[in-house]
Image (tube, coloured by chain):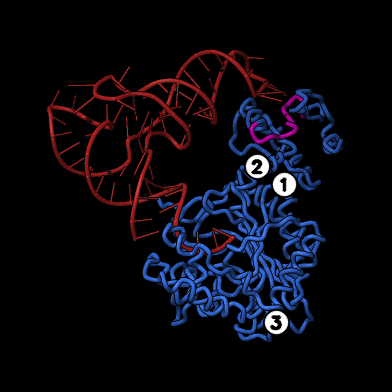
Chain colours: A blue, B red
Amino acid sequence: MISIPKGMKDVLPADSAKWQFVEELFRKTAEKYGFTEIRTPMVEHTELFARGIGDTTDVVQKEMYTFEISERSLTLKPEGTAGVVRSFIENKLYAEGLPAKYYYITPCYRYEKMQKGRQREFHQFGIELFGSSNMLADAEVILLAYDFLKSVGLDDVKLHINSIGCKNCRAEYRKALQDFLRPDLDKLCDTCKGRFDKNPMRILDCKSPECKRIAEGAPRMLDYLDDECRKAFEDLKKLLDIYGVPYEVDPGIVRGLDYYTKTAFEFVSDKLGAQSTVCGGGRYDDLIEELGGPATPGVGFGLGIERLLLIMEACGALPQKAPGCDILVAGLGEAAKTKALELTKQMRDAGKRVIIDVMDRGLKAQFKYADRIGARYVAVIGDDELAKGVVSLRDMEKSSQTEVPADKVIEVLNG
RNA sequence: GUGGGUGUCGUCAAGCGGUUAAGACCCUGGGUUGUGGCUCCAGUAUACGUGAGUUCGAAUCUCACCACCCACCCCA
């Protein structure tokens, strides 16, 4: 038997309705805020991610599905933003006027070890808003996510926000942090020693008790924001208050993708095991320029669909699957079977969902089949009915049965 | 890459050194030669992850491997 590659998951027929439900809701929500869909390829030049996400990040260093073909290095997208930015620049979409507002639904690929809420192929809802430095853009994006999460029936997800500053204040902070940690540098765990130069902010996230102890009392990013960044963060909080979005300031949020500046936020849930983030995003004011576009600020988020579904499952927020069949037509005997097929065709042309048994089973089995698939009605056509020009129409819910003229069946179904 | 846990019919699940390896669900057929959901009866399955070892005897003990799950790391 050939099995599915590790880290991949089938969405089986039993679950596809859940996907359709959240997808439709996401589209509606995004459009409510004036975002339109953009679709970019699953494959991009490796360089796009190396430069966009940052080549010191874990994602780029060890998690990408990269392959060579015709001497080009290509990579399956590990996140959604870089591709949208590339398309924005390449197609000169900035010429259409700003702000540019896009949403997308896309698979992403990261070669990671599996665990709860974590797959190698996963799917994201994404939002990107380009062109505005105003914190209202951030507030809009966050409100959209909040609105969406509420509309799917989740109210126990919490919003955490932080500001990780701009290039300038981050450099200041970085220095301060390194100065603070330097005396204990040799006592840090091995991974943190490596982080000291490349990304000292990550050390604050380390779970090792020794590192935690050392990091205690370390300077906080929020205290090193320059005037502009500090004001921006205050603005954001005010706007969220006006919009009525509850949040918690969490100085611990350090996005693992290098392009983030200023605003960083996460929607977290305690129903996901170790992976608590269902939606993560923030501002990236330098990314578009770094990838070769005009200097244009941006803000957006990615929302994990599998994780969303996990939480919804845990909260019982998933919709029940709707019955997929209006009527099953059962014909008995050659002549009647022909009539049954004709009737089936007619009803389908009228838009009805009609099922006919392709297993050539007996009548009793066909009734069981009708019951299993949730058919509302069963129409029986045998020699008796044929002679009278009627069908025996059984209402499966009411367990009642009537004879209906063959050409009136559709009317009865319509009520 | 590093830990921990689990592997018995399609699914759930007993069994813990000697059994024809239970049971339930599902599926199929039947209880009126044309009627479901409930009930009754019957039927179907190459089920002990793989490979070695211990033993008179292993699903049960040992070891290795594999797979899956969970956790670290990182992220959606």
Label 2 to label 1: alpha-carbon separation: 8 Å
Residue type at mark 2 is Cys
Residue shown at 62% from the left, 54% from the top: A268
Using residue A26 as the reference point, say whether residue A303 is left or right of it.
left
Residues marked 3 and 1 touching at CB (< 8 Å): no
Q: Quadrant of the C terminus of chain A?
A: top right
Comes first in the chain, label 3 or label 1? 1
Please state the extent of the stretch shown in magenta in the rendering: A372-386
Question: Which chain is disc 3 placed on?
Answer: A
Comes first in the chain, label 2 or label 1? 1
- Position in image of residue A45 (x %, y %): 52, 78
Using the image as rendered, state which of residue A392 and residue A178 is in the foreground: A178
Residues marked 2 and 1 touching at CB (< 8 Å): yes
Circle 2 Cα neighbour tier, 10 Å, few/some/many (<14 / 14–19 / ≥20)? some
Residue A220 vertical position relative to residue B55 in the rendered view, above or below: below
Residue that badge 2 annotates = A315
Using residue A371 as the reference point, say whether residue B47 is left or right of it.
left
| Numbered tag placed on residue A153 in the rendering | 1
Callout 2: SS: helix
| Numbered tag placed on residue A296 in the rendering | 3
- Position in image of residue A109 (x %, y %): 52, 64
Whether residue A382 is in magenta: the answer is yes
